[in-house]
Image (tube, rainbow, N blue to C red):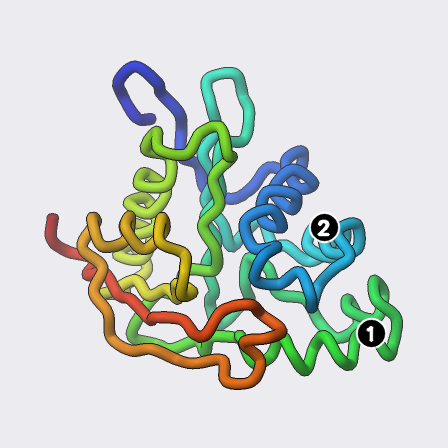
Amino acid sequence: MTDGPFSFAIRHGLPDEFRAQAAALYWAAFRDKLGRVMGPDQRATGFISRVLDPDHALCAIGPDGDLLGVIGFKSPKGAFVGGSFRDFVAVYGMAGAALRVALIWRLQSDIENERFLIDGLIVAPHMRGRGVGTALLRAMRQEAGRRGYHELRLEVADGNDGARALYDRLGFRDIGWTGTGALRHVFGFRGATTMVWPVSGP
């Protein structure tokens, strides 16, 4: 539980009653990046709600029991938002699934053994700038340490200046950049910077 004029609790997992809300928040956060691939909106939120894994997330719950934010992670056992080809077929049909899987695969980050990989940080719009994102990242840092990792890793897309400022402020550092090539016209950004954050330290 954080202290101060506004308090909220960080908890492991995502309660089932927040599944639809988390899917809507996730889509709102990543729609500009994935809209041309995962849209239309109703199908995208339906797909996300179908596949998200509550065991691969931490969430922030407000004093009134409302969902304020979620941070997901990937592991060898799965991801916060993953999904199989069968899931894509169920939502988009066979032809739509084949195209979307081929494109989404280009954005997938590998699961490595050295760093704990963040799979999306989302904060309710009315709660941004109130410490929710920072608290979720710090909680994920503790989770990474508990699992024996030495660093957190994430990808931040070009143009996502607000998120980049937060990561810089917390002490994440750049270790590389990956371009999207011709697919920048599909995803709407030129590339993404890989950033890491040591589990130990300030």
Residue 64, position as x, y percentages in the image = 52, 16
What residue is disc 1 on? Answer: 96
Q: Amino acid at mark 2?
A: Thr
Q: Is residue 112 above or below residue 92?
A: below
Q: Residue at the location (46% across, 59% down)?
A: 73
Q: Amino acid at mark 1?
A: Gly
Q: Is residue 6 left or right of residue 76?
A: left
What residue is disc 2 on? Answer: 45
Quarter of the image for residue 114 reads bottom left
Q: Nearer the viewer, residue 27 or 16?
A: 27
Count of labels shown?
2
Dot 1 crowding, Cα within 10 Å, few <14, some 14–19, many 20+: some
> Is disc 1 placed on a helix, strand or loop?
helix
Q: Is residue 155 left or right of residue 32?
A: left
Residue 116, position as x, y percentages in the image = 35, 65
Closer to the chain start, of discs 1 and 2, is 2
Q: Is residue 99 above or below residue 188?
A: below
Residue 12, position as x, y percentages in the image = 46, 42
> Is disc 2 placed on a helix, strand or loop?
helix
Q: Nearer the viewer, residue 183 or 70?
A: 183
Residue 26, position as x, y percentages in the image = 58, 49
Q: Residue at the location (83% across, 71% down)?
A: 89
Q: Residue at the location (62% across, 50% down)?
A: 27
